Image (spheres, grey):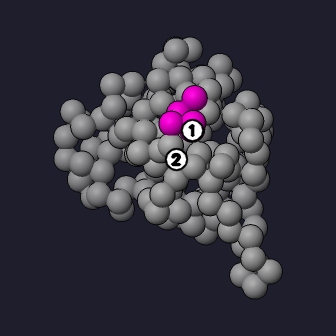
């Protein structure tokens, strides 16, 4: 079975994160994974673009009520009409998550992944370590290839 890898990040990221997201998408496709994302612009679009370069399959879980709102690299648009509530659908549809940068929407997806024990790899994203909260479970890396390798190798039995 092909592994479902979620890619999360801001819709308006700093420019330096775009090539990282594109490389993550490429690596997911090269390794035979299916890319799951929020289907819109920014990190989501760059990751989908990278996956399409290598003939990968992309799924966009859209917050809107129309398929037309998906970025041009989404193969399978899932229309939800539920706004940010779709973040839980993105996470629960994924067997591992790669977070790249991100704003508050990404933070909610990170929280859902941690709560539901979905393996999570972070590239230049939120840091949540605290000796008082016991939050653990994010593997931080700088390299897109390493992030995808880790996500693809995580045990899918951990997922709900």
**Residue 153 visible (yes or no):** yes
**Span shown in magenta:** 15-19
In the image, is 79 to the left or to the right of 102? left
In this figure, which residue is indicated by the disc labeled 1?
A: 17
Q: Is residue 159 left or right of residue 80?
A: right
Q: Is residue 69 above or below residue 49?
A: below
Q: Residue furthest right?
A: 131
Find out whether residue 18 is within the magenta segment: yes
* Identity of the residue drawn at 57% across and 36% down: 16
Furthest residue in direction front, as rendered = 15
Rate crowding at label 1 as few (under 14), some (14 to 19) or many (20 or more) other CA atoms within 10 Å. some
Q: Foreground: 148 or 101?
A: 101
Gap between marks 2 and 1, in whole Å? 12 Å
Q: Percent from the top left, x then y, of residue 87? A: 43, 56
Q: Say whether residue 124 is left or right of residue 75.
A: right
Residue in the image at 75% along x and 85% along y: 132
Q: Is mark 1 on a helix, strand or loop?
A: helix
Give the position of the N terminus as an image quadrant: top right
Q: Main secondary structure of the magenta part?
A: helix
**Residue 111 % position (x, y):** 57, 66
Residue drawn at the location 52% of the way across and 53% of the way down: 102
Q: Mark 2 points at which residue?
A: 8
Check disc 2: other Cα within 10 Å, few if <14, some if 14-19, many if 20+.
many
Identify the mark nearer the N-term, 2 or 1: 2
The tally of labels here is 2
The image quadrant that residue 67 belongs to is top left
Residue in the picture at 30% in, 35% down: 70
Quadrant (top left, top right, bottom left, bottom right) of the C terminus: bottom right
For the residues labelled 2 and 1, say whether their Cβ atoms are less than 8 Å apart.
no
- Left or right placement of residue 45 versus residue 147 in this view: left
Q: Is residue 144 above or below residue 52?
A: below
Determine if the magenta segment contains residue 69. Answer: no
């Amino acid at each position: 079975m092909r592994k479902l890898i979620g890619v999360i990040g801001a819709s308006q990221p700093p420019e330096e994160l775009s090539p990282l997201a594109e490389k993550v998408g490429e690596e997911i496709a090269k390794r035979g994974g299916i890319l799951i994302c929020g289907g819109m612009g920014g990190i989501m679009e760059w990751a989908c673009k990278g996956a399409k370069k290598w003939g990968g399959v992309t799924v966009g879980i859209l917050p809107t009520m129309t398929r037309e709102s998906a970025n041009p690299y989404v193969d399978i648009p899932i229309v939800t009409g539920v706004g940010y509530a779709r973040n839980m659908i993105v996470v629960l549809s994924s067997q591992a998550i790669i977070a790249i940068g991100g704003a508050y929407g990404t933070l909610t997806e990170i929280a859902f992944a941690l709560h539901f024990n979905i393996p999570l790899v972070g590239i230049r994203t939120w840091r949540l370590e605290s000796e008082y909260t016991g939050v653990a479970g994010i593997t931080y890396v700088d390299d897109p290839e390493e992030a995808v390798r880790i996500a693809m190798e995580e045990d899918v039995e951990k997922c709900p």
